[in-house]
Amino acid sequence: MKFMDWLDERLAVRQLVKVMLTEYYVPKNINFLWSFGVLIMLVMAILFVSGIFLLMYYKPDANLAFDSVNKTIMMDVEYGWLFRHTHAVGASIMFLVLFIHMARGIYYGSYKAPREIVWITGYILFILMSATAFTGYLLPWGQMSYWAAQTITTLFEKIPFIGPDLVIWIRGNYIVEDATLTRFFALHVMLLPLLLAIFTAIHLYAVRIVGSNNEDGGELTKEDKKKGKGISFWPVFMAKEFFVMSVFLVFFFYLVFYQYKFAMDQINFIPADYLQTPHHIYPEWYFLAFYEVLRGFFFSQNLGLIAFLFSMFIVAFLPWLDTSPIKSGKHRPLYRIMFWIFVADFLFLTILGKLPATGLYAWLGFVGSIVFFIFFLALPIISRIEKKRLAGGM
Amino acid sequence: MKELKILLILIVLVLIGYWGIEPYAHSVMHGEVKQPDHTYKDVPKNIPTTGDPVKGKELFTTNCASCHGLKNDGVNPGMDIQTSITSFKVVPPDLSNIGAILDEHFLAYFIKNPQDATKNPKFAMPPMAQLSDEDIGHVVAYLKSVTKKDLTGKEITVEACGRCHSIKYQKVLSDTPKEPLKEYLGKVPPDLSVIGKAKNVEYLETFINNPQNTLPGTSMPRLGLTKESTEKVVTYLDQIADPHRDQRNTLGIWVIGYLLFMAGITFAWKKKIWKNIH
Amino acid sequence: MAEERLSRRDFLLYAMGGWAVVGVGGVLYAMYKTWEPLPEVKAQATTKFDLSTVQPGEIKVVSWRGKPIFILRKSPDMVQCKDRSVKDEYTVVAGICTHLGCIPNWEPEKKTWHCPCHGGEYDACGKNIFGPPPRPLDVPPFKIEGNSIVLGEEGQEYKQMKEKGLTV
């Protein structure tokens, strides 16, 4: 204890522990979906650690990358395969956990005042995570890595005036080549993780200020906390969290050992070849829904691109699209219907995104893309209806 | 109860998504894998596959040995690598074990008409029109008599695929250098080191059995491997692509067991902490 | 007196800030320039190719700026198009599908290009005839020098095509 006193005088650790853990209260009426924030931190930690060990053998060079991954790491390094499987599955599962975390926020209205900053920083984290995943996917330098990067960087060509030059600038070459690989590598292992860490800190800080939302959307007052309406973050909340984490890890490592193929596409075990396009090109599953919105407007490429950008960015504006004073979807029947349509549509788009965009699939993709936007466009209308009803009720 | 309901919804959504992007999408993209035909139905079976090995050896020496070697019987090819590349753009294989690797009817028909047997009009070996069907029978009998028994998957793979394909991670390089191969086949054929990860076993088996069926227009010839050799090749390719499979399967059980136990402890602790809350 | 000093301090503060912005701008410019293609990449800007080496009905693929350029010498049984042909019988197009940047394969029997990615098709002139591609295959900038073609430079013929909007 002497040591703790010594440390406390210099770092105020006791106060810190109180503020951050033991006297930070989380509402009682929450379910295990509120555990997903900590799960994201867990997956992030797994990705950091596995990434560091991959970094020790990986070679960011177009001539060496493929072999350093598929021979050195997968075959020669002891447990190298384990770290690669964990990293690949971890990246995939990160998005599953993120999507659930975001969907929970949308369903229970966690983006609403006073949590706009929480939502915005969370959204920035999502974009950063997407960028990290995209740059990381190029690194094994397989056919799918290569052509995914080629296809997505080609999108920038459509930007008026600067487009074609911008593409060359991003690639550092006229096509995706060694220069592209090395700079993506630098972004993936250095800049993007750094930004992720910074924004995670801001996100968590913001949550500590405004507190967690809950199933019913009411806010905890200081009185409530004393009366026992809240539970302390430590040990009560985390006691449950640890259980959720271990169950999650069982699922996660089951995937790592026995069901990893969804995260390591077969085609990516063929070395990158810029003269031969694979028969089917598709992004990893977590980008499929957005990719399908891009392809959905199959009759106009420009429209598709605009829709794609719109689908990525509109999510950030949720707090201002939905102005209804009622927070939780639990008490908003109309909103709930729209929410489930949105979830179903997202799933539908994800599945369509992997199928060849021909014939019926092309039209289904178009319909699905339109439905995707209906949710966001309906929010202001639902808000108005609910406001009227509230006013009438009073 | 409510939490279980939420969990159930999550599981259902994840399973639907998984089904859509994995089994369903792949079935749409790749269609059904055709069944391999190891009897080579289209190959005429009327050429004899038995005869006198001694006569066969004579015929071999006069007709085949100018290009092909046969190390098992001490025959060296009459041509060095450079000459054969200039004339064929590919190095003719050593035929020591060909009698054990190939289906005998296929082998007989192949000698007679390589282009049709391999389904590859650009195949480098000329038809052996000077040999009668009976002669071919003698040669086949000879080839079968000199082969080694119980070839390993690696030996078969190197003999059957090695004149064009490299297996870099196993330190096996193709007999023919890359440049002439590019001329002969249009591109350098893929390295087979991790092909077992890029393609699944069923695909490889069907593809090796008849490449044109799976990939119309490909410059890979039909090889006429017997069912047993095909299986050995495919097993070998699968094995070298995934050398840590056993370790992974065993370790997985330990890790999951450990985590299940961890879940048990954490559950007990949660119960204890939450006893007085509600 | 006091006010004056304050305003002078303000001015200095702004000057310092402004000067710092200039410095940051310089650093950003240097960062931006590091991502430019390297000299050896830029050296690939032009490629010269002898057209007479292509037989009628034959297609050759030339690499220009890392992109495959298809040079097809059309035989009389192929689709003819005056405006998109070079020297009346050659089709010179970038072998990159205008849909999502894949490389189409030439199918000699059908005399069309077929894109393996999403099923787009182009005729022997490089015009899109089926599937998702929004426009014909691009014509790369070229210049005719006798029997040779120089890719990457804009010659008279290319400029004429460009004016008619046929190159993009």
Image (tube, coloured by chain):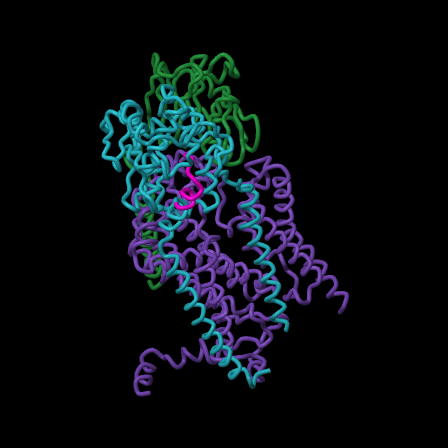
Chain colours: A purple, B cyan, C green
**Residue C144 on image: x %, y %:** 37, 15
User: Quadrant location of residue B227?
Assistant: top left
> Going by the image, does A365 lie left or right of B108?
right
Question: Range of the magenta residues?
Answer: B223-232
Extreme right residue here?
A392
Q: Is residue B250 left or right of residue B65?
A: right
Q: Position of residue A97 (x, y in %)?
A: 51, 61
Q: Residue at x 34, y 30 (%)?
A: B52
Instruction: From the top left corner, tell me how far across and down residue C83 is, in percent.
Output: 50, 16
Answer whether residue A35 is visible to the viewer in this image.
Answer: yes
Q: Image point 44% across, 51% down: which residue? A: A264
The answer to whether residue B225 is magenta is yes
**Res. A169 in view:** no
| Residue B109 covered by magenta stretch | no
- Within the image, what quadrant is residue A79 found in? bottom left
Quadrant location of the N terminus of chain B in the rendered image: bottom right
Above or below, A153 relative to A341: above
Q: Quadrant of the C terminus of chain B?
A: bottom right
Count the numbered circles shown: 0
Front position in the image: A260 or A24? A260
Q: Residue C36 or A362: which is nearer the viewer?
A: A362
Q: Is residue B85 above or below residue A147?
A: above
Picture quadrant where residue C155 is located: top left
Q: Position of residue C145 (x, y in %)?
A: 34, 14
Q: Is residue A14 left or right of residue B173?
A: right
Most frequent secondary structure within the magenta stretch: helix
